[in-house]
Image (cartoon, grey):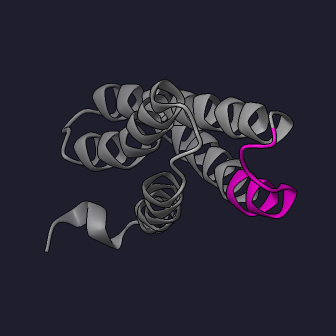
Amino acid sequence: MFPYENLDVYKKAYSVNQVVYRLLKGNKTIPGYARNQLGRASLSIMLNIAEGSAKFSNKDRRNFYVTARGSTFECSALVTFLKDENEITSEIFENINNEYDSLSRMLFAMIRNLEE
């Protein structure tokens, strides 16, 4: 087992990525460019957490976690846009966006801990 698989933040990122993947796979009304961007940004969160966990220095780990946190903001902006354009329901938006908010907070704490 890889170390990142034990991280709660990775588990949460993996879980929300599964929800987003299924949403995008099943909803063909969302324009392709938006599906592509949300899919890539959501995957980026998970992958940057995994890659960051493999780094030896706190500075290197921190950089990957900062990138992952930036991707959570990107995803939140995208799902907000999709909700406002009636591409996703308010319920789906709330569920996914709450997960992104939680991920952002977890990553923020990890970033802060690496600065000390």
Residue 93 lies within the magenta run: yes
Residue 115 can be seen in this image: no
The number of callouts visible is 0
Query: Quarter holding the N terminus?
Result: bottom left
Against 18, is 24 above or below?
above
Q: Residue at x 69, y 38 (%)?
A: 76
Against 60, is 40 above or below?
below
Residue range of the region highlighted in magenta in the rendering:
86-97
Q: Is residue 29 left or right of residue 97?
A: left
Q: Residue at x 59, y 43 (%)?
A: 29
Q: Position of residue 39 (x, y in %)?
A: 43, 41
Q: Between residues 48 and 15, which one lies in front from this camera angle? A: 15
Q: Between residues 27 and 110, which one lies in front from this camera angle? A: 27
Q: Point out the residue furthest to the front here.
A: 29
Against 19, is 45 above or below?
above
Q: Residue at x 45, y 34 (%)?
A: 41
